Amino acid sequence: MINLLEDYFELQNKLNVEKFRISQIKNWAFKKKITDINLMTDLPKTLREELSIDFHVLELDSFIEGRDSTKFVFRTKDGHFVESVLINEKDHYTLCISTQIGCAVGCKFCVSTIGGLLRNLSFAEIVDQYFYISIFKNVFIRNIVFMGMGEPLANFDNLKKATLIFLKEFDLSKRHITISTSAYTNYLKRLKEDNLLNKLNLAISLNASSDETRKSLMPNVVGSLKDVFELLKTYPLEPRRRITIEYVLIKDVNSSLKDAKNLVNLLKNLKHKIKVNLIPYNESPILPFERPNESDIYKFQQELLKNDISCTIRWSKGLELAAACGHLSRIRTFDMINI
């Protein structure tokens, strides 16, 4: 049995059919969202009868819909759970995709790190989150953010293969794909030198304005803030593109006015290359952290704005589903919600 995703880069050898036939099959599956060989009418009937192709590597375990997002739980072939979130924006859909089962970064404020890292997802498992959901919901998903479970750059090769498929088969734009990373300096160096992935949007999960605070929140991150920003100074950016600095605001940890002033000093030499997304902490019943009150959130933002640093507040969607930033987990959706 051939699998369209798992065998994507070897289809010519494994199917042993003309190259244009493979293009026809891909067109039906990826463009038209048809995964029944019998409905692929431009293939000869004899060939349809001979072909034996699987189109998915993930099994849908469950999903739950909210006001503006849908959380999907997939089961892998080896019995683990992967979560993805489809976000309904004003004029398009965005899919938050996982790249690992669990996470090794160890962020104290994130549910995804509980239990550590089990393994990387294959490129086929990364792609199938998008492929499966686009068929299931029958929608075109314009934006992808590698911001689900895991550190995307720790799964570099599979991330790159998945990106190639997204660009080639689903007609996505590089401008609509974002890599969110905790910014290990060794990973950033590799990303900076890769002429495909460095054309995607880059979001740095910073979450602190000092190494001490950052290490307490993200204990396994490698490299100092100084090292990170030295790399960002020479990071290649196309015209009108900026690097996003993601900063989760946590009460009594990193959300004071002093923290804001420190962040201004950290960013002041990169104003032309960055924009800041402040993310009010999404509370979880199994973690001890709290969201700051709104007045402190806006004071933090104003400190950045008055120093000419582009800054927006990103109020997360999917809170009622345990689907917001920092909520995705190896534990099934309904188990998480009912804790």
Image: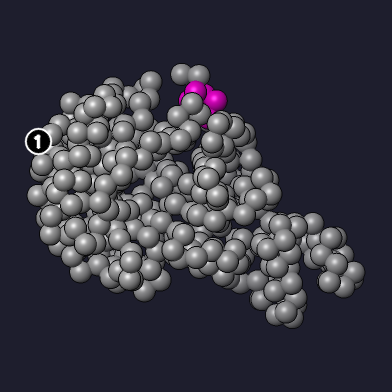
x, y percent for residue 43 = 83, 71
| 34 up-or-down from 22: above or below | above
Image quarter of residue 169: bottom right
Q: Is residue 275 left or right of residue 68?
A: left
Q: Amino acid at mark 1?
A: Lys
Which of 45/88 is in front? 88
Considering depth in this image, is 220 or 233 the residue closer to the camera? 233
The answer to whether any part of residue 41 appears in the image is yes
Q: Is residue 257 left or right of residue 81?
A: left
**Is 66 part of what is drawn in magenta?**
no
Q: Name the spot of residue 153 as percent of width and height, x first.
A: 35, 57
Quarter of the rendering occupied by the N terminus: bottom right
Residue lying furthest front: 306
230 or 122: which is nearer to us?
230
Is 197 located above or below residue 110 in the figure?
Answer: below
Residue 194 placement, left or right of 52: left
Give residue 330's position: percent from left, percent from top.
Answer: 47, 35
Crowd tier of the residue under label 1, counting other residues whose Cα lies within 10 Å: few below 14, some 14–19, many 20 or above: few
Q: What's drawn in magenta, residue-wise?
A: 333-337
Q: Kindly identify which residue carries mark 1.
A: 258
Image spot of residue 261 (x, y percent): 10, 42
Q: Residue at x 28, y 38 (%)?
A: 248
Number of marks: 1
The quarter of the displayed image where residue 278 is located: top left
Q: Main secondary structure of the magenta part?
A: helix
